[in-house]
């Protein structure tokens, strides 16, 4: 008959407040499977006790790290971050499943993603200015509109998406380049310059300036199929229709209370959709700019509009954190998509119209299944979701070092291994303790 396994007990003593007080009772853990056989001396007992405790601590540290990631995802409505700052712009390639995104934050990076997988392909490190507007051609010519970090001069740039290189900067632009529109034949580009109260019209792909239209303070712009007609909308609710080749204003109307923040033009150029700060979407007949219908769409400003490639659906994003799909030409509501935890800044359809991407101030980019209205994927960048870095402390000894953020070492005393980015400290030069989320665990033989 085999002798019974000896039973040892470990006592977990929870960390208290600064005074040492705690409301959590110590936990007694019985251990029978210890990493040694037969009898052992006191040193062996202590070593085995620490080993068993370390195994339990590793499990707890993994749980704590997962809890941190879960908490971050919960703050963004279940998604990890695509940026470390608000997502401000989206654009999808007319052919092929490529999505480009822009935001603020420390780098102002433009990111290129593959759809529907949501794979991050590359980052275009263009500088620290926030990216406020994007457009992309079927041949991979990327147009980037930047904000002005000092409030005076923004930038409008042409990039080769395939090479990941800047090919041309389209002059100095006063203020933020806050909105872009690309004609469907990809020959004409329009950009909004905030301080100069103008819309500038450019020829592509050469990037030459065709003309400057003095519109007043515009927030949004849209172009017809061949770029001959341009619609601009902005402060006070104005909407203007311009003849681009002639450079003449054809029609001007007032959309009502608030500002016009978003515009989209139908493929045939006969209908214009406007989104306002009053939460409405208005449908206008072109070229008369006759109001045909008002959609009481959102409870806050309509910040973004996009028409799917088939021309049968309109997407709207709003400061009320919702994304909506509308049937065209009737204007009936097809579905409402919720999940963002902050303002929606931008929306874009993929080339087949089966996926709708939305960017938000909650730092996330969501891909929605147009058929079901459900989130199919969140686009996450590991660089925007860094793991917490550990800290090292040596009790009773001033020197402690972190090695590559993976291990802590108390100089001249026992070293503490740092597992899963938890923090460890040396206690009395004989044992290591784990400091995970909000608690420390001291393991002593009982």
Image (cartoon, rainbow, N blue to C red):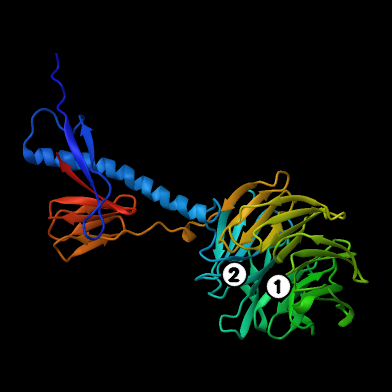
Give the secondary structure at mark 2.
strand
* Mark identifier at residue 179: 1
Separation of marks 1 and 2 at Cα, in angstroms: 22 Å
Q: Residue furthest right?
A: 288
Q: Which residue is mark 2?
A: 165
In the displayed structure, does residue 288 sit left or right of residue 119? Answer: right
Image spot of residue 133 (x, y percent): 66, 70
Image spot of residue 198 (x, y percent): 75, 83
Report which quarter residue 18 is drawn in.
Answer: bottom left
Please tell me which residue is depicted at 31% across the width and 58% down the height of the picture: 390
Image spot of residue 193 (x, y percent): 70, 80
Along the line of sight, the residue nearer the viewer: 337 or 365: 337
Along the line of sight, the residue nearer the viewer: 374 or 157: 374
Please tell me which residue is depicted at 73% across the width and 44% down the height of the picture: 371
With respect to residue 254, does 266 lie above or below?
above
For the N terminus, the quadrant is top left
Report which quarter residue 197 is drawn in.
Answer: bottom right
In this rendering, which labeled residue sits more in front, label 1 or label 2?
1
Please tell me which residue is depicted at 57% across the width and 57% down the height of the picture: 121
């Amino acid at each position: 008959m085999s002798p019974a396994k000896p039973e040892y007990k470990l006592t977990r003593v929870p960390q208290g407040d600064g005074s040492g007080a705690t409301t959590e009772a110590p936990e007694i853990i019985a251990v029978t499977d210890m990493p040694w056989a037969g009898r052992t001396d006191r040193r062996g007992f202590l070593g085995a006790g620490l080993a068993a405790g370390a195994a339990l601590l590793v499990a707890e540290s993994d749980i704590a790290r997962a809890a941190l990631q879960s908490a971050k995802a919960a703050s963004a409505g279940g998604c990890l971050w695509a940026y470390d700052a608000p997502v401000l712009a989206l654009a999808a390639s007319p052919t092929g499943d490529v999505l480009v995104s822009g935001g603020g934050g420390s780098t102002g990076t433009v990111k290129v993603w593959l759809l529907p997988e949501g794979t991050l392909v590359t980052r275009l490190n263009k500088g620290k200015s926030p990216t406020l507007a994007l457009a992309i051609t079927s041949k991979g010519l990327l147009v980037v509109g930047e904000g002005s970090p000092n409030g005076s001069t923004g930038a409008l740039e042409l990039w080769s998406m395939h090479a990941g290189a800047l090919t041309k900067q389209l002059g100095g632009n006063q203020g933020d380049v806050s909105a872009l529109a690309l004609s469907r034949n990809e020959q004409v580009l329009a950009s909004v310059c905030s301080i100069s109260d103008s819309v500038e019209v450019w020829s592509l792909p050469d990037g030459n300036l065709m003309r400057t239209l003095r519109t007043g303070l515009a927030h949004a712009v849209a172009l017809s199929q061949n770029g001959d007609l341009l619609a601009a909308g902005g402060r006070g609710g104005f909407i203007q229709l311009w003849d681009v080749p002639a450079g003449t204003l054809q029609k001007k109307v007032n959309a009502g209370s608030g500002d016009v923040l978003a515009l989209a033009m139908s493929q045939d150029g006969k209908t214009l959709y406007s989104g306002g700060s009053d939460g409405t979407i208005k449908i206008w007949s072109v070229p008369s700019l006759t109001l045909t219908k008002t959609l009481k769409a959102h409870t806050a400003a309509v910040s973004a509009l996009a028409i799917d490639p088939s021309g049968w659906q309109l997407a709207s994003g709003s400061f009320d954190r919702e994304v909506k799909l509308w049937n065209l030409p009737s204007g009936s509501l097809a579905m409402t998509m919720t999940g963002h935890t902050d303002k929606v800044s931008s929306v874009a359809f993929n080339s087949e119209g089966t996926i709708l991407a939305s960017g938000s101030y909650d730092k996330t980019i969501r891909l929605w299944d147009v058929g079901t209205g459900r989130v199919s994927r969140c686009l996450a960048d590991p660089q925007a979701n860094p793991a917490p870095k550990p800290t090292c402390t040596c009790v009773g000894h001033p020197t402690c070092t972190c090695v590559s953020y993976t291990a802590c070492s108390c100089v001249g005393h026992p070293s503490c291994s740092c597992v899963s980015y938890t923090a460890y400290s040396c206690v009395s030069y004989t044992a290591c303790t784990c400091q995970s989320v909000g608690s420390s665990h001291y393991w002593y033989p009982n």
